[in-house]
Amino acid sequence: MARVKRGFKRRRRHNRLLKLASGFRERRRTAYRRAVENVHRALRFAYVHRRQNKRNYRRLWIARINAACRMNDTKYSDLIHALNQAGAIIDRKVLADIAVHDPEGFTRIVQTTLSGS
């Protein structure tokens, strides 16, 4: 049976993975076996943290909306409940942006939604 040396296919596969490890330090970027371990680990963390990032931003938006609500003598939960009752389609990202960059507009939103409910 003929011997298979794999040739350029192995080199192409190794180079593709080593390119992903190019930002690592020392043998983690040069030794293939170490690079495999660390690239797989990094990809796993990237997957998890993409989802964590969404959670963290939602927490930030809620904190900003709550702070703006407190300045208008109301609670976050009361505002969200009033918005849902009014059928307003405005998400927390936009609401937080309004609260930070346009406090007067946020005050008008709070007054109209809470007076309408």
Image (tube, helix red, strand yellow):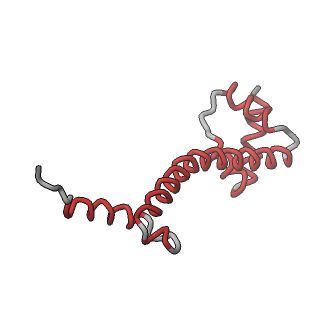
Q: Residue furthest toward the bottom?
A: 26
**Location of residue 2 with respect to 18 vertically, above or below:** above
**Residue occupying the point 49% across, 71% down:** 27
**Residue occupying the point 51% across, 69% down:** 24
**Location of residue 60 with respect to 75 vertically, above or below:** below
> Where residue 31 appears, x then y in whole percent?
43, 68
**Residue occupying the point 79% across, 38% down:** 76
Q: How many marks?
A: 0
Give whichever of 49, 96 is nearer the camera.
49
Q: Residue furthest toward the left?
A: 1
> Where residue 72 appears, x then y in whole percent?
84, 45
**Location of residue 102 with respect to 93 vertically, above or below:** below
**Location of residue 41 with respect to 116 vertically, above or below:** below
Give whichever of 88, 44 is nearer the camera.
44
- In the picture, measured across the screen, residue 63 lies left or right of residue 74, that is left
> Where residue 7 appears, x then y in whole percent?
19, 63
- In the picture, measured across the screen, residue 108 lies left or right of residue 51, that is right
Q: Residue furthest toward the front?
A: 1
**Residue occupying the point 43% across, 58% down:** 36
**Quadrant housing residue 19:** bottom left
> Where residue 61 appears, x then y in whole percent?
69, 47
- In the picture, measured across the screen, residue 82 lies left or right of residue 52, that is right
Q: In what quadrant of the picture does the C terminus appear?
A: top right
